[in-house]
Image (spheres, helix red, strand yellow):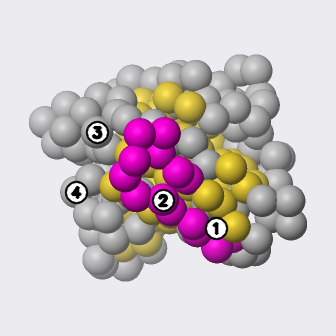
């Protein structure tokens, strides 16, 4: 778990996650040192050039594992575990449920205050978002370009983007609310609960 008196880092070249204590002591949080993709107990798991770390409020550590093109989670507790939540072979740009989503060299990541995970998919040149819903095992990844809409109750909304890419429009087929959302150079994320 996170420790305010230490620094955690991705030891990219050694394929490990490390903790540096205030007194300078370095310990391994996870990774065997093999350049590989393997989930499991932290000291049995293998990473392939981990490049960035981000702590979630529940003391879960997200890892951008660049050479395996994955995002990984290190959970602590009674049985600490490393798991792959998105990406893997083949490397590509594929959105959708995390098990089928594909990435290309994620290099940086950060959690928002509501636990959405944004990461730089450097090989594809996109900012992307992983939304992990506590009440559902369905995990989604979407490409953050103009606008991302995730609907928590598993309904889907389709948006049409106008010709000059300035607005995304949604008009329900059977009445209801019409949404017009301005698009900009920065990514926007809207989560409907």
Give the position of the N terminus as an image quadrant: bottom left
User: Which residue in the structure is indicated by mark 2?
Assistant: 178
Badge 2 density bin: few <14, some 14–19, many ≥20, Cα 10 Å: few
Task: Say if mark 2 contacts mark 1, CB within 8 Å.
Answer: no
As measured in the structure, the alpha-carbon distance from the residue carrying label 1 to the one carrying label 4 is 26 Å
On whether residue 60 falls in the magenta region, the answer is no
Who is closer to the viewer here, 148 or 136?
148
Q: Which residues are magenta?
A: 170-183
Quarter location, residue 34: top right
User: Which residue in the structure is indicated by mark 4?
Assistant: 58
Who is closer to the viewer here, 139 or 179?
179
Residue 18: x and y in percent read 48, 55
Residue at disc 4, secondary structure: loop
Residue 71: x and y in percent read 55, 41
Task: Say if mark 3 contacts mark 2, CB within 8 Å.
Answer: no
User: Which residue in the structure is indicated by mark 3?
Assistant: 153
The first of marks 1 and 4 along the sequence is 4
Task: Say if mark 4 contacts mark 3, CB within 8 Å.
Answer: no
User: Which residue in the structure is indicated by mark 1?
Assistant: 187
- Which of discs 4 and 3 lies nearer the camera? The answer is 3
The first of marks 3 and 2 along the sequence is 3
Q: Residue placed at 19% from the left, 39% from the top?
A: 135
The first of marks 4 and 3 along the sequence is 4
On whether residue 182 falls in the magenta region, the answer is yes
Q: Residue placed at 68% from the left, 50% from the top?
A: 160
The first of marks 1 and 3 along the sequence is 3
């Amino acid at each position: 778990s996170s420790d305010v008196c230490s620094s955690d880092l991705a030891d990219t070249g050694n394929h490990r996650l490390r903790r540096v204590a205030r007194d300078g002591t370095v310990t391994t949080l996870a990774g065997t040192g093999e350049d590989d993709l393997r989930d499991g107990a932290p000291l049995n798991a293998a990473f392939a050039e981990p490049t960035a770390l981000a702590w979630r409020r529940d003391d879960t550590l997200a890892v951008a594992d660049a050479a395996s093109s994955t995002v990984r989670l290190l959970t602590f507790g009674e049985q600490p575990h490393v798991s792959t939540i998105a990406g893997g072979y083949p490397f590509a740009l594929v959105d959708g449920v995390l098990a089928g989503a594909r990435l290309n060299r994620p290099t940086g990541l950060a959690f928002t205050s509501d636990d959405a995970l944004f990461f730089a998919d450097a090989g594809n040149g996109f900012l992307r978002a992983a939304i992990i819903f506590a009440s559902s095992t369905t995990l989604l990844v979407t490409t953050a370009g103009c606008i991302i809409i995730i609907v928590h109750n598993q309904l889907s909304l389709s948006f049409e983007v106008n010709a000059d890419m300035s607005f995304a429009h949604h008009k329900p087929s059977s009445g209801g609310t019409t949404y017009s959302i301005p698009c900009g150079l920065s990514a926007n994320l809207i989560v409907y609960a």
